[in-house]
Amino acid sequence: MIGLTASAALANENLGIVHGGALLTFADIALGIVVAEALGAANCATAQLQYQFVAAARAGNFITCEPEIVRQTSQMVFVRGLVKADGRTVGSADAIFKVLEPAKIGAIRAG
């Protein structure tokens, strides 16, 4: 399980509700962590990410995601997870990560 406490900096101004972009970014990172762990290295990139908002999270909530790998091939990893705020489901995420070859990672870094 991956988690963070939602600070006021993540909230929409004057509403106290965590910005959707912050939840999406958190989901991408959480799903990516489990993929990198499964691969034994951080040699992956998000190819597709889908997020369904189902409720609001508030500043001060402890946000969690418990990702699970649905399927892994030599080229792609399919993963999903529920995003919760203080134990209450606020969203669900599904993603596909592309497995990168080490030589290509060097080329990407070089620009």
Image: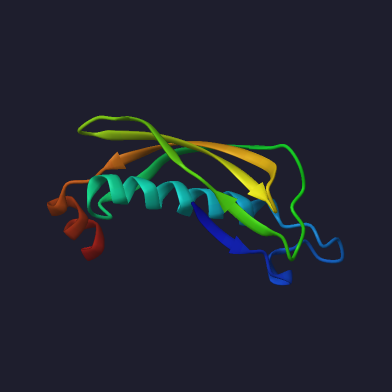
Between residue 77 and residue 105, name the one nearer to us: 77
55 w.r.t. 85: above or below: above
- Quadrant of the image for the C terminus? bottom left
Q: Is residue 18 left or right of residue 77?
A: right
Which quadrant would residue 41 be assigned to in this image?
Answer: bottom left
Q: Is residue 65 left or right of residue 15?
A: left
43 w.r.t. 97: above or below: below
Total marks placed? 0
Which residue is pictured at 53% across the width and 49% down the height?
27
Q: Is residue 2 left or right of residue 7?
A: left
Q: Position of residue 57 (x, y in %)?
A: 74, 52
Which residue is pictured at 60% across the width and 37% down the height?
92
Residue that lies at the very extreme toward the right in this rendered image? 14
59 w.r.t. 42: above or below: below
Q: Position of residue 17 (x, y in %)?
A: 79, 57
Which residue is pictured at 46% across the width and 54% down the height?
29
Which residue is pictured at 74% across the width and 66% down the height?
60
Q: Which colour scheme appears in the figure?
A: rainbow
Which quadrant would residue 76 be assigned to in this image?
Answer: top left
Residue that lies at the very extreme toward the front in this rendered image? 87
Q: Position of residue 89 (x, y in %)?
A: 68, 41
